[in-house]
Image (cartoon, rainbow, N blue to C red):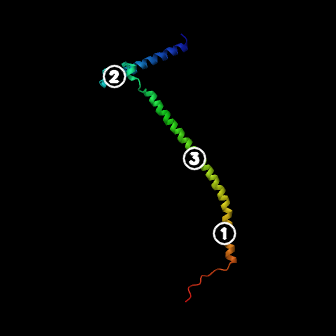
Amino acid sequence: MTDPQKTAVGFARLIQLWTIQLRRITEGLAGMTGLSESVLSQSAQSLQGLPHPGALSAAQLNLIASSVASQRQGIAAMQAQLRVLDEQLAMLEQVLGPLAEWSRTWAHFEGLVMPARRNPGPED
């Protein structure tokens, strides 16, 4: 026998031993719970309609993975929106800065040119 064949036979033997151990564990648990026969020895028809535990876990994990991916896509979309908003605010800031400076200068000019209005008190 060649090396790959020995490896394949060894692997098949390990799987067989593992299956036997799982069957013994399942039968032992069935005996401890008071079941008259092992779940493995029940007819396949009595188990139809029930999801396999591995399939159920896989479905749940797929749902969780999809949910996480969806949330990350939502965050990416929000980040893009925030970048656009930040760019808009930066442009507005650039426009408002000189306008605010001009407004201060104009107010100072008005203060110099226009006589100060005094509010005369009520005449007695």
Count of residue discs: 3
Q: Residue furthest left?
A: 34
Residue type for callout 2: Gly
Residue 31 at x, y percent in the picture: 31, 22
Does residue 4 sit above or below 77 in this rendering?
Answer: above
Does residue 84 sit above or below 36 in this rendering?
Answer: below
The crowding category of the residue bearing disc 3, from other C-alpha atoms within 10 Å (few below 14, some 14 to 19, many at least 20), is few
Dots 2, 3 in contact, CB < 8 A: no
Residue 84 at x, y percent in the picture: 63, 50
Please identify the quadrant where the C terminus is shown: bottom right
Residue 10 at x, y percent in the picture: 49, 15
Q: Residue furthest top?
A: 1
Q: Which residue is mark 2?
A: 28
The crowding category of the residue bearing disc 2, from other C-alpha atoms within 10 Å (few below 14, some 14 to 19, many at least 20), is few
Q: Which residue is mark 1?
A: 104
**Foreground residue, 104 or 66?**
66
Q: Which residue is mark 3?
A: 78
Q: CA distance from mark 2 to mark 1?
A: 89 Å
Q: CA distance from mark 2 to mark 3?
A: 54 Å
| Residue under the image location 65 percent in, 58 percent down | 92
| Residue under the image location 49 percent in, 35 percent down | 63
In-image side of 19 versus 118 (left or right):
left
Dots 2, 1 in contact, CB < 8 A: no
Task: Give the number of the mark in front: 2 or 1.
Answer: 1
Residue type for callout 1: Arg
Q: Secondary structure at mark 1?
A: helix
Which circle marks residue 70 in the picture? none
N-terminal label among 2 and 1: 2
